[in-house]
Image (tube, helix red, strand yellow):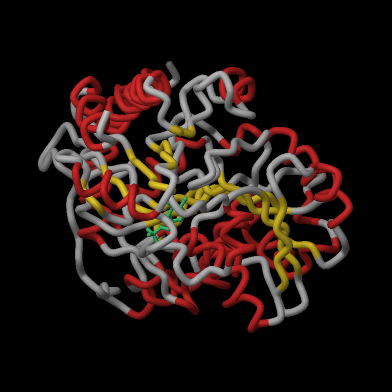
Amino acid sequence: MRFEEFTTRFVQQTGKKEGPISPVMINSASFGYGNSETGEGIFDGSIKKPLYARVGNPTSGQLEQILASMDGGIGAVAASSGMGATAMATLSLLRAGDEIISIGGLFGGTYSYFSETLTRFGITTRFFDVDEFTAVEEAVNTATKIIFLESVGNPNMRLPDIARIAEIANRYGVALVVDNTITPLSIAPLSLGADMVVYSTTKIITGNASALGGAVVFRPIRDGEDKFKGDRYRDVHPFIQKMGSMALIANAKKRALRDFGMSANGFGSYLTMLGLETLPLRMDRIVSSVETVAKALYAKRLAVNHPSLPHHPHHNRYRDQFANGCGTLLTLDLGSKEAAFEFLNRSKLITITANIGDSRTLGLHMASTIYRDFDEPTREFLGITPGLVRISIGLENAEEIVADFLHAANI
Ligand SMILES: *Cc1c(COP(=O)(O)O)cnc(C)c1O
């Protein structure tokens, strides 16, 4: 399992050998410069000291370094939430008239951000299923600035072929942004050819509902040829000239973080690092529990959707490209809203909430909550049936989860 390589690294990176072992939490909103010369140096970038918490906080800085090393990036920028991170990654590249190609089932907030909010600013998004490779290629034009995908369709559980989509993005010179919230450590999007990785650290990374947060991890701009040096990304060129390999970070900080203020806070980043220390252990346990639960429920003829099951359309992709699992989620179709409510209400383990990736098993009826404002065709596209319940498996004993679910389903 890929998780093993992170067990040593994360605890060593968060703790210190001298002085305070737990990460030092700095919550100051502003920082004194001492003298005007230092102030000038901080603003022109020649002195690396904190400027103001909206554009960087030292505790968040430690978290950013760990997240960048986790994904093999050149740097990361922490954000106030996962949506803040998605906004930062996308707004740093977009201007009115641009287009986004969005692939796969989308987190509800991201879907409304693309389909409702960005359209008000003249930015169009076209949505495709994970396997519509030809249609995606045909949709690319000179206005296309971003191909966006989620590593696991939430809640449709469809799996993208990330390397193949990255190949298309790179062939056409379009930036690929991957939301890897559900599969940190399992999937390494930058090594598969992505340019930016977006996280909601609120979910499995922190893992216990203690902190809202997000982050974007960036790849370096390459010496020689690089798609960001092409005409499509003229707005990024000044940052490439000034910052070289670090350009995408500087661009995101100036074009999004500084001006929109989706900044992380020190306390949240501290709690997120405490979560990171145990992330590999929790991922390892949960991806194996999810398979156990899916298999047991399927054996009892419940309509369970998870790619580890042989009849799932992406079972082969799960086996070949998701060897470290696809996160904490599975879905159950109970057939009707009434049956779904009864299942959730009868369960003694499930915490009913919109969150995912927690130490506890969580569940939610989709159509009456996150997707209630969506019209019927959109719900169908996103795979939201009337009886659909999304489950995020937690750290409880897997056999106890199975027993609880069977009882809840009157089996
Ligand atoms: C929760 C979630 C987000 C948004 O994150 P917040 O921290 O709630 O803003 C984005 N993408 C995915 C896949 C998520 O599950």
**Residue drawn where x is 52% and y is 67% of the image:** 87
**Quarter-of-image position of residue 16:** top left
Q: Is residue 377 left or right of residue 400?
A: right
Of the 4 image quadrants, the one containing the C terminus is top left
**What's the residue at 56%, 54% (across, down)?**
106
Name the foreground residue: 315 vs 232. Answer: 315
Q: Position of residue 85 (x, y in %)?
A: 47, 60
Estimate the x, y position of residue 240 in percent, counting from the top left: 69, 59
On screen, 164 above or below 98? above
Q: Quadrant of the N terminus?
A: top left
363 shown above or below 231 = above
Q: Find residue 207 and report its image quarter.
A: top left
Q: Is residue 277 left or right of residue 365?
A: left
**Splitting the image into four quadrants, where does ligand 1 fall?**
bottom left
Q: List the single residue furthest toward the bottom.
A: 120
Image coords of residue 325 (percent x, y): 46, 25
The quadrant where residue 231 appears: bottom right
Q: Is residue 299 above or below residue 179?
A: above
